[in-house]
């Protein structure tokens, strides 16, 4: 999903979460490899920004109603 989204990997982190702050992820993101960051995200669901929505083509991370409405406007009846 990360690669399909076109977003920086750091956008997938829940930066306002307690775990993110406790583990000092902000500093780790600066020097960690992509594989290390994937491992960090996979280690604890509380580190992942939510919601994540995909239709198999588009990927949206975090909720911003205007962006979601625009991205999925073709699905409106």
Image (spheres, rainbow, N blue to C red):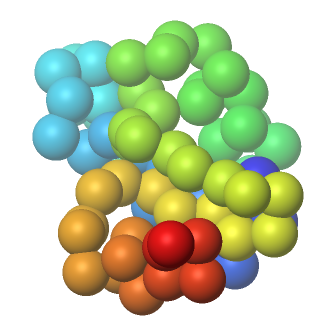
Q: Residue at x 82, y 43 (%)?
A: 35
Relative to 11, say whether 48 is above or below.
above
Q: Is residue 39 visible?
A: yes
Q: Is residue 8 visible?
A: no
Could you say where residue 34 lies in the image, as x and y percent from the top left? 76, 53
Taking the image as shown, residue 6 lies to the left or right of residue 8, namely right
Q: Residue at x 59, y 30 (%)?
A: 41
Q: Quadrant of residue 4?
A: bottom right
Compare residues 1 and 67 and report the one nearer the observer.
67
Could you say where residue 70 lies in the image, as x and y percent from the top left? 42, 86
In the displayed orientation, state which residue is furthest to the top: 44
Compare residues 1 and 34 and report the one nearer the observer.
1
Could you say where residue 2 lies in the image, as x and y percent from the top left? 72, 58
Could you say where residue 59 lies in the image, as x and y percent from the top left? 64, 63
Q: Residue at x 49, y 73 (%)?
A: 76
Taking the image as shown, residue 13 lies to the left or right of residue 52, namely left
Q: Residue at x 60, y 83 (%)?
A: 74
Relative to 19, say whether 68 is above or below.
below
């Amino acid at each position: 999903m990360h690669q399909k989204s076109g977003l920086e990997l750091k956008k997938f982190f829940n930066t306002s979460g307690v775990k993110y702050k406790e583990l000092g992820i902000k500093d780790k993101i600066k020097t960690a490899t992509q594989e290390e960051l994937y491992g960090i995200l996979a280690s604890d669901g509380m580190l992942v920004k939510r919601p994540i929505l995909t239709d198999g083509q588009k990927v949206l991370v975090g909720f911003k109603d205007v962006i979601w409405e625009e991205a999925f406007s073709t699905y409106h009846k």
